[in-house]
Image (cartoon, grey):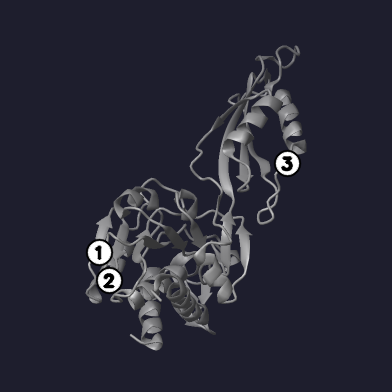
Amino acid sequence: MDRKENHTDAFSLLKKLIATSSYSGQEEGTASLIADHFASHDIPTIRNGNNIIARNKYFSDTKPTLLLNSHHDTVKPAAGYVLDPFNPVEKDGKLYGLGSNDAGGALVALIAAFLHFYEREDLAYNIILVASAEEEISGPNGIESVLPELGPVAFAIVGEPTQMQMAVAERGLMVLDCVSKGRAGHAARGEGVNAIYAAMEDIARIMNLSFEKVSPLLGPTTMQVTVMDTPNRQHNVVPGECHFVIDVRANELTSFEEILDKLRKELNCEIKPRSTRLRSTSISLDHPLVQAGIQLGKTVYGSPTLSDKALMPFPALKMGPGDSARSHMADEYIEVEEISKGIYDYIELLRLVAVSS
């Protein structure tokens, strides 16, 4: 398949994906489309839930494995859509539609690159492609559920809209549920201990807290209080409890354990993390994958947004066509040329890394 045919094939698949609803946890239709696409190229796949797995033709247990991964689930359409989010419309060099940019363009470009190398016998690495589900909600039935089936993975490319630059580090996310305790009483008589005031004291401390380790790629670890509430709904009762939520975005130098330890020493409230799964990740600038990208003129940066990279226990590079600023926006789009360039750059990157010399 030449470059033009590869682009046409990928573009056709992307239009079909846009036209098929695939909200997180409801990706049955797009999973079937992707499996059918591989079948049309006589490539067998394995389906795990709504995740589709394909291996290169000459896969060998004696070789290390490179994983290509992107997701086919979407968020629900944002308010303000003028166009039909499920109607793939091409206009002025842009393809509009829900999931076109995040992350349909990256997914079809990775599939096109996989097809390019599928029958090569001279690969230094196996290549596995996983089109994953539930990325948008970091769900348990997405990439995390598939990794045990893949065997050892040496490293990965995660397809997300990065303008084809290399996101070598990514912030982690930890959500903390906090409870400040007081003592309920009658507001008119000034009884009790107001838990809201106790929470406000802790929130003031949070505003002034900082962490010493500042990443050259991601900057400092940051925290924001994003929700505050009390179980009490009576205006005349001093609340005995106040609940608030802290959104923590960690750089790759500061562990969740360090953050929790510091907060528990500094604050009086009870603190419970919802999850510690979505940790900050990074790949060394000396890694062959990154060095290959640098050879192609790509730049490196730290990404503030999460992806399935956070769930991978091996080095992973986030890179793909499209622009993160367009993700989840109304009238989402990807430029047609971005898809073509993405396919070409992925192929060149894999040629430098995965083809035996």
- Percent of width and height locating residue 72: 40, 62
Rendered image quadrant of residue 300: bottom right
Judge by depth and name the residue closer to the eye, 156 or 78.
Answer: 156
Can you see residue 322? no
- Percent of width and height locating residue 212: 73, 41
Q: Which residue is mark 2?
A: 38
Q: Is residue 165 left or right of residue 48?
A: right
The reply to whether discs 1 and 3 touch (Cβ–Cβ < 8 Å) is no
Distance from the alpha carbon under mark 2 to that under mark 3: 49 Å
Q: Nearer the viewer, mark 2 or mark 3?
A: 3
Q: Earlier in the sequence, mark 2 or mark 1?
A: 2
| Residue extending furthest toward the front | 357
Q: Residue at x 59, y 72 (%)?
A: 298
Q: Residues within 10 Å of mark 3 (few under 14, many from 20)?
A: few
227 lies above or below 49: above
Q: Secondary structure at mark 1?
A: loop
Amino acid carrying label 1: it is Thr
- Percent of width and height locating residue 18: 40, 69
Q: Quadrant of the N terminus?
A: bottom left
Q: Is residue 94 left or right of residue 134?
A: right
Q: Is residue 342 left or right of residue 49?
A: right
Q: Which residue is mark 1?
A: 45
Q: Quadrant of the C terminus?
A: bottom left
Q: Which residue is mark 3?
A: 212
Amino acid carrying label 2: it is Phe
Judge by depth and name the residue closer to the eye, 321 or 224.
Answer: 321
Distance from the alpha carbon under mark 2 to that under mark 1: 7 Å
Judge by depth and name the residue closer to the eye, 302 or 203.
Answer: 302
